[in-house]
Amino acid sequence: MGTVVTNTAFNLERGEPKQRSIVGGSGASMTLLYCGDCGCHLWVVCSGAIDGGDAFELEGIQPCAEVWVKRRPSWLCALEGAAQWDENVKR
């Protein structure tokens, strides 16, 4: 399970995490941060990700596409007029 946290709301109390960069299924780069002692996953920074704040004000924003629709539950309808992608969109 994960959650979105803005950079300004996050505070690492101690230690210096190790990191490595990978390219995800969408073609976007992600930086994985983890404990240098035990290897426990701590957090991920995704390139191009919105850092919350005013970006979460949804008034006036209209989705233009849906991804991973092949995994959409049968009870969830497609968004009218939105492009449909079975998996990730390649950048």
Image (cartoon, rainbow, N blue to C red):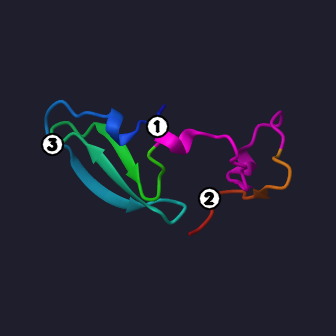
Q: Is residue 91 left or right of residue 52?
A: right
Dot label at residue 57: none
Q: Is residue 63 magenta?
A: yes
Q: Which residue is mark 1?
A: 4
The residue under the point 28% across, 56% down is 20
Number of numbered discs: 3
Q: Which residue is mark 2?
A: 88
Q: In terms of sequence position, does the residue under pointer 2 or pointer 1 come before the other?
A: 1
User: Which amino acid does the dot numbered 2 rest on?
Assistant: Asn
**Residue 19 x, y percent position in the rendering:** 25, 52
Q: Which residue is mark 3?
A: 16
Please say if 23 is above or below 17: below
Please say if 63 is above or below 4: below
Q: Is residue 20 left or right of residue 38?
A: right
Q: Residue furthest bottom?
A: 91
Q: Is residue 38 left or right of residue 8?
A: left
The residue under the point 72% across, 59% down is 85
Q: In terms of sequence position, does the residue under pointer 3 or pointer 1 come before the other?
A: 1
Q: In terms of sequence position, does the residue under pointer 3 or pointer 2 come before the other?
A: 3
Magenta region: 52-77
Marks 2,1: beta carbons within 8 A? no
Quarter where residue 13 is shown: top left
Q: Quadrant of the C terminus?
A: bottom right
Front: mark 3 or 2: 3
